[in-house]
Amino acid sequence: MLSGESVLAFLLAFLFSFISVQSTGDTDINPTTVVAKSSQIIFGGLSKGRGEGEASAQRMNLVAGAVAGCAAGQATDMTGDLKTGHLLGAKPNVQFAAQLFGATIALFLAPGLFILFAIASPCIITGETPCTYSAPSAAAWVAVAKVSVRGRLSPLNANALPGCHRSQASHPPFLWIHRHRPLNIRGHCCGREAPLDS
């Protein structure tokens, strides 16, 4: 990642942190995933406009999404903690010191635990199948990185198509379109053209 892209990633993280804190404060819904995916889409357009190679563009995309997602997640977690502390009558500076202490310990503990976990199950890094841990959230991150860089998804397994079509058919906008405009709705979310009724 170049220095300009790094600055953009941190600016987006800062902006998206405000959005996440506002959303969590108003609705009690944490939009961390949406924030991360938004950053991924922005960086996908940036890398596509620069004509970057697919592997480096996807790597940059994932890092930018992780920076925005982590910043938004930390901001909303801290806001929730401060709100709870306020309701319980705790002092904010004491809470902040406790969070700083915990984050400092986690800074050293988390990488060590990850290394230990990766030694016990190397398939989480190598991607070998079958793996005990499927990591569906990681698959979603990779799919967004591929879509934002390539512009399309690779076709899914044929077994996934019926579920995709059912989810489309149960979604109200699709039902309205199907009822008012009798078109052959196709499974665009599935990454390939497939009839809805198949």
Image: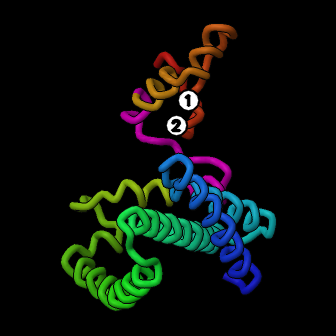
CB atoms at circles 1 and 2 under 8 Å apart? yes
Tell me residue 34's x, y (percent): 57, 53
The answer to whether residue 71 is above or below residue 140 is: below
Tell me residue 145's x, y (percent): 58, 60
Determine the image quadrant of residue 176.
top right
Instruction: Give whichever of 151, 75 is nearer the camera.
Output: 75
Amino acid at circle 1: Gly
Mark 1 neighbour density, 10 Å: few (under 14) some (14–19) many (20 or more)? many
Give the structural element (helix, strand or loop) at label 2.
Answer: helix
Disc 1 target residue: 187
Marking on residue 190: 2
Secondary structure mainly formed by the magenta segment: helix
Farthest front residue in view: 89
Q: What is the quadrant of the N terminus in the image?
A: bottom right
Instruction: Give whichever of 9, 153 is nearer the camera.
Output: 9
Marking on residue 39: none
Count of marks, rendered view: 2
Give the structural element (helix, strand or loop) at label 1.
Answer: loop
User: Which residues are the magenta region?
Assistant: 143-162
Determine the image quadrant of residue 104.
bottom left
**Rendered residue at 57%/47% (across/down):** 153
Tell me residue 87's x, y (percent): 40, 62
